[in-house]
Amino acid sequence: MTEKTSNNKSKRIIVLTSLLIILVTFFGSIIFLSTAITPYKITGESMNNTFLNEQLTLIFKTKKVKYGDVIVFTYIKEDNSSIDMIKRVIGLPGDKIEIKADAENNNVYHIYRNGEKLVENYIKEPMTYEGGYHNITEITVPQNSIYVLGDNRNESEDSHKGIYANYETIQGKVFFNVTTFKFV
């Protein structure tokens, strides 16, 4: 075999190997994206102004959540019917949650987690008595449950009304708003 033939054979092997790597990466990415990411359309006003009704988002399918994540979960009602909900993670199992009136304005309420007042720049407006808030003495988030609240607190059905997210029903966490083309 001549040196030229050997070089041509080596070049073909390199090209074929590169093509194989590109194809495997391409199809692997498609499979990953189709199983790990799913679209979710917002319904309702509970997450205003962060998300508006009818906006399209993408959720990353995971059950690992942390404070501040916006998650989609299925809530099983007492009659065994279910509804998908989108809320913000406020408390994890074992956390102590309190709702207290503001010292200067009795009609405005704040969330405390493990004794610390949360700074919540993302909520639409302050929580009020008219919005269903009142002083709630310390509660402990049950095991396998997540304390969740909507960003539009005064118009949200959520943990302050006894609705918790359950780890088993978490569909994933929102990471991208398709409608506004912004990462969350």
Image (tube, rainbow, N blue to C red):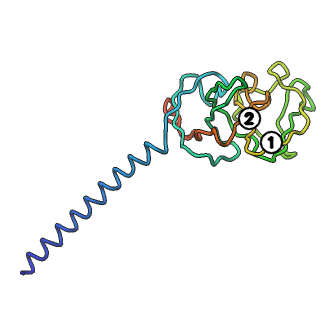
Whether pointer 2 and pointer 1 mark residues with C-beta atoms closer than 8 Å, the reply is yes
**Residue under pointer 2:** 164
As drawn, the label of residue 132 is none
Residue drawn at x 72%, y 21% is: 155
- Residue 178 appears at what percent x and percent y? 49, 33
Badge 1 marks a residue whose secondary structure is: loop
Q: Residue at x 73, y 25 (%)?
A: 78
Q: Say left or right for 4 vs 10.
A: left
Taking the view exactly as shown, the residue that stands out farthest to the front is: 80
Q: Three-letter amino acid code at disc 1?
A: Val
Residue depicted at 17% across the width and 69% down the height: 11
The spot of residue 67 in percent (x, y) is: 71, 45
178 lies above or below 156: below
Image coords of residue 116 (percent x, y): 85, 45
Residue 66 vs residue 1: left or right? right
Q: Is residue 25 left or right of residue 78?
A: left
Compared to residue 152, the image places residue 164 above or below, namely below
Secondary-structure class at tag 2: loop
Q: Earlier in the sequence, mark 2 or mark 1?
A: 1
- The C terminus is located in which quarter? top right
Location of mark 1 (residue): 141
Could you tell me which residue is drawn at 43 percent across and 48 percent down?
32
Question: Mark 2 to mark 1: distance in Å?
Answer: 9 Å
